[in-house]
Amino acid sequence: MLDNNSQPLDIQKLPPNETLFALLKWSAIPGFSRHHWGTDFDIYDHAALPENYKLQLIPQEYESGGIFTKLNTWFDQQLTNDFFLPYKNTTGGVSPEPWHISYQPIAQTYFNQLSLELFEQEIQASNLLLKQEILQNSSEIFNSYIININQGNS
Ligand SMILES: [Zn+2]
């Protein structure tokens, strides 16, 4: 796991609450990833990978001077309003994911069905690790990490 500066983070040394919020920057709570909807995909340019390069999916790869700069520029120029990047810029929740593309016409239907009540019900019915920490912070998690996305292509 990496910290905000893409540096390795040792979660063994963190208290449960901090572990939870460190995880949330990089990974959705099981059952609450947009990938599960079938509308969202992580895209990289395989042809741009240097030989023996290990794909990291970190923002630096998509920024100016990164190996996927061309793909990022193509996103900026070609994405219509039907396809957008919900985690392109930081929102204070999930870390920026300039590789994560979403098909808005269908994704919006699922997004509209999300609610804090549904989230709490699903967590309550689960036996996830950190379940109590999730429930104690459910409102913050729901608002900052589940529904907090970049809307449209701006
Ligand atoms: Zn993704």
Image (spheres, helix red, strand yellow):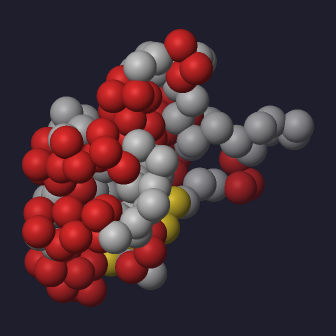
Exactly how many numbered labels are in the figure? 0
* Residue in view at x 22 percent, y 70 percent: 121
Asked if 130 appears above or below 103 in the picture, the reply is above
Q: Position of residue 52 (x, y in %)?
A: 88, 37
Of 58 and 81, the residue lying toward us: 58
* Residue in view at x 23 percent, y 81 percent: 110
* Residue in view at x 15 percent, y 80 percent: 113
Position of 143 with respect to 41 (left or right) is left
- Quarter holding the N terminus is top right
Asked if 84 appears above or below 51 in the picture, the reply is below
Q: Position of residue 116 (x, y in %)?
A: 11, 63
Q: Position of residue 27 (x, y in %)?
A: 45, 47
Of 45 and 150, the residue lying toward us: 150
* Residue in view at x 54 percent, y 22 percent: 11
Position of 48 with respect to 6 (left or right) is right
Of 142 and 128, the residue lying toward us: 128
Q: Quadrant of residue 4?
A: top left
Asked if 83 appears above or below 62 in the picture, the reply is below
Farthest residue in the right direction? 52
Position of 62 with respect to 123 (left or right) is right
